[in-house]
Amino acid sequence: MYNVLEKLRAGETIEGKDKEIYDQGLIGILKDIHDQIDAAVAQAYGWPVDLSDEEILFRLVDLNKERAAEEAAGDVRWLRPDYQNPEGKQAGAKGKQAELDVGAAIKLEKSPWPKALPDQIAAVREALEDMGEATPEQIARRFQRARTASVEPLLASLAALGQAQVTEDGRYAA
């Protein structure tokens, strides 16, 4: 259902089996509900509704930095104070939280997941070579609509052919 929803959001034509899923899954209604949730969340944060995913991520990282600074100074915003902090204790100041360079992580565009098996194998091998070492999930995240369950057997095949190695912790290395 969510694959069809993504196609709908991307403006792709819904036809064939996807049209059947669209009709039976009430994807139009699902899209409307998600749009309402997105609008409510944007309103709760005081943000415009039409932000890109990248802009939302940057704003969330900035918000996280603000909250981390508040907590480092001892100001904790409890969601459920009666449960999380029943004695009402004041938090003490903590050290500084390590920061992640989100800008570098965001610039990586997801490639489309190839339809043909030979192209999928080549794409997985290339992604693994770029990353050096990765889990099937990390490789799948490099592609639009790729599933870990689809990537895992391809990595196992590459390992069986000697084009990848399985590490002790179950990761794959180029």
Image: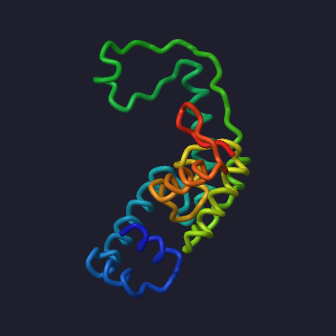
Q: Residue at x 59, y 19 (%)?
A: 73
Image quadrant in which the N terminus is located: bottom left
Residue furthest left in the image:
24
Between 98 and 56, the residue placed more toward the observer is 98
- Image position of 109 (left or right of 82): right
Q: Position of residue 68 (x, y in %)?
A: 58, 29
Q: Residue at x 50, y 52 (%)?
A: 152
Q: Position of residue 84 (x, y in %)?
A: 34, 23
- Image position of 163 (left or right of 24): right
Residue 78 falls in image quadrant: top left
Residue 173 shows in the view = yes
Between 44 and 16, the residue placed more toward the observer is 16
Q: Residue at x 71, y 40 (%)?
A: 101
- Image position of 93 (left or right of 163): left
Between 64 and 103, the residue placed more toward the observer is 103
Residue 63 shows in the view = no
Tell me if residue 123 comes above or below residue 91 in the rendering: below
Q: Position of residue 142 (x, y in %)?
A: 61, 56
Q: Position of residue 13 (x, y in %)?
A: 48, 86
Residue 123 falls in image quadrant: bottom right
Q: Residue at x 52, y 49 (%)?
A: 137
Between 163 and 140, the residue placed more toward the observer is 163
